[in-house]
Image (cartoon, coloured by chain):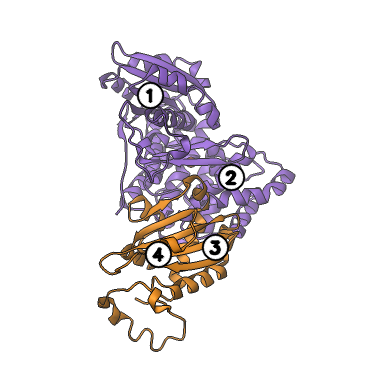
Amino acid sequence: MAGARTARVRPRLSPFMIGVRSDALVKMARFPSEEWTKLYAEKLNANKSYEDAGKNWEGAITFVVQKDSALDKDAFIYLDLYHGKCRDAKFSLTESDLPTPEYKYAGPYGNWRKLINKEIDPIQGLLTGKFKLQGSMMKIMRFTKAAKEMVNTTASVQTES
Amino acid sequence: MWFFRSPQVVFGDEALSYLSSLPIRRAAIITDRYLLGTELPERVRGALPEGAESLVVGDVSAEPPLSEMTAHLEKVRGFSPDWFVAVGGGSSIDTAKILFALHERPDLTVYDITPLVQLGLRTKSRLIAVPTTSGTGSECTWAAVLSEENEKRKHELASPEILPDYAILDPSLVVSLPPEQTRNTAADAIAHAVEAYGSTWHNPFSDAMAEKALELISENIEGVIRDPWGLGPRGQVHIGASMAGLSFSNSQIGLVHALGHSLGATFKLPHGKAVGLLLPYVVDFNYDACPERYDRLNMLIPPKYRGRRLSGSLRSLLGMMGVARTVRDAGVEEPAYASSMDALVTLALESTGMVTNPKDSGSEDLRNIFIKAFDGD
Ligand SMILES: [Fe+2]
């Protein structure tokens, strides 16, 4: 079932996956997927810098991964964040399956890949229109460090290329 | 993709007279309580085009809360200005930015001023900043700082649309700046240049502004302190401060401002005094994250102040300027400081300066810097 809930990445990217997977002992996951969401939540809960920066944060956020030439369906990663921990993480290809979050951070799949590879800064990404944010700016501006740690955590998930 | 944003900058002798060439019919002049009692508002009025009407809003206090910033909003709206002319330091300019935005868009609150939405300003009016201090750089930035009511917190508002249309840098407007403000605002400008240069968002445009700013200020500030009325050095420091504003406005501030806003808001220290004293400590903390960049900046400081490391050079330069070296020197008492430490750290952690600082830091790092800065190394 997990496979059925994974947005399909077009095959042209697949050659990069061979070899990386075969000898890897670490858990890897395709982005975006249920597996990736689970691994991400684990990594976020292990990230002390995130815990420190998000210790006063309460509120859920959904990462919206929008389809583009390399991803054929929109995907949604819902994260219930509370006092520096991720209490719940859900993945779906149908937004209405997920609880309504306080924030949405949305961008096309290609930009998410760049974000994960640290080629885009998450806030510069917003300021240049590569990502869109929905939700109260006033609150989130006090947690930019936590947001940065959330993005840094994406890089620590072994993500299939 | 990134941007370089700047107002049109008018600078040098008699720059104020440029006002007469602009199509101003109704000017809202926003200034502070101190300047209201001087001849400056009249000078600005006199520089407006013939026949222009004006309204002076003149009771902006230093680092004002929101209620003060917007106290005259209805009066301003009733006057219906086609230009806002901010005359003063950062507080007057930031107040004018907010009044300008809320005059343009009566449906907004200040908290709607964010860079993520198009505000659609400039349908009725435009904005000119005439700084009378050399330091905050607000005349060249798209940010405004406001103090929260009944809270020891500063809120950082930002939108490219509140960047002034013109910045008028007239050295005759800063020669009478008192010594205390001269040194605090210059220290703020130096901090802007150093933070912009170390920022993870630095870029060739912001680098060029930061380098030249540090050079102009560090070469001329001694002359300003020796002879406050000398137009030459004052003019150079004035230009340098605006260039420092352009540098951080187009990259970002860092930990000095994250810590400085927290310290300043908690103990009511002037902004420049707070960031000036913290700057060398943060440079020490950051050094291993960007040694080449700090070494390059160090070479721009005049040899008489230059040490082996940027932090040492800054200590010499800021020391010559009379900037406090420690939090204790700045007048904060130890028991109050110790009991506020958790709150200081939490406030600093919430600043946007945390994310663009060259070195990643967390609560413990901030606490250590605050502790070190109390008595010095
Ligand atoms: Fe500043």
Mark drawn on residue A50? 3
**Residue corresponding to mark 1:** B85
**Residue corresponding to mark 2:** B262
Same chain under badges 4 and 2? The reply is no
In the picture as drawn, the residue positioned furthest to the top comes out as B51
Upstream in sequence: badge 3 or badge 4: 3
Q: Position of residue B208 (x, y in %)?
A: 33, 48
The hue of chain B in the figure is purple
Q: Establish if B352 lies above or below A54.
A: above
Tell me the kind of residue under disc 4: Thr
Q: Residues within 10 Å of mark 2 (few under 14, many from 20)?
A: many
Same chain under badges 1 and 3? The reply is no
The hue of chain A in the figure is orange
Q: Quarter holding the C terminus of chain B? A: bottom right
Mark drawn on residue B362? none
Tell me the kind of residue under disc 1: Val
Same chain under badges 3 and 4? The reply is yes
Q: Position of residue B125 (x, y in %)?
A: 33, 26
Tell me the element at label 2.
helix
Query: What's the distance in space between the residues labelled 1 and 2, CA to CA?
Result: 30 Å
Q: Nearer the viewer, mark 3 or mark 4?
A: 4
Q: Quadrant of residue A131?
A: bottom left
Same chain under badges 1 and 2? The reply is yes
Tell me the kind of residue under disc 3: Tyr
Query: What's the distance in space between the residues labelled 3 and 4, CA to CA?
Result: 28 Å
| Frontmost residue, B73 versus B83 | B73
Query: What's the distance in space between the residues labelled 1 and 3, CA to CA?
Result: 43 Å
Mark drawn on residue A94? 4
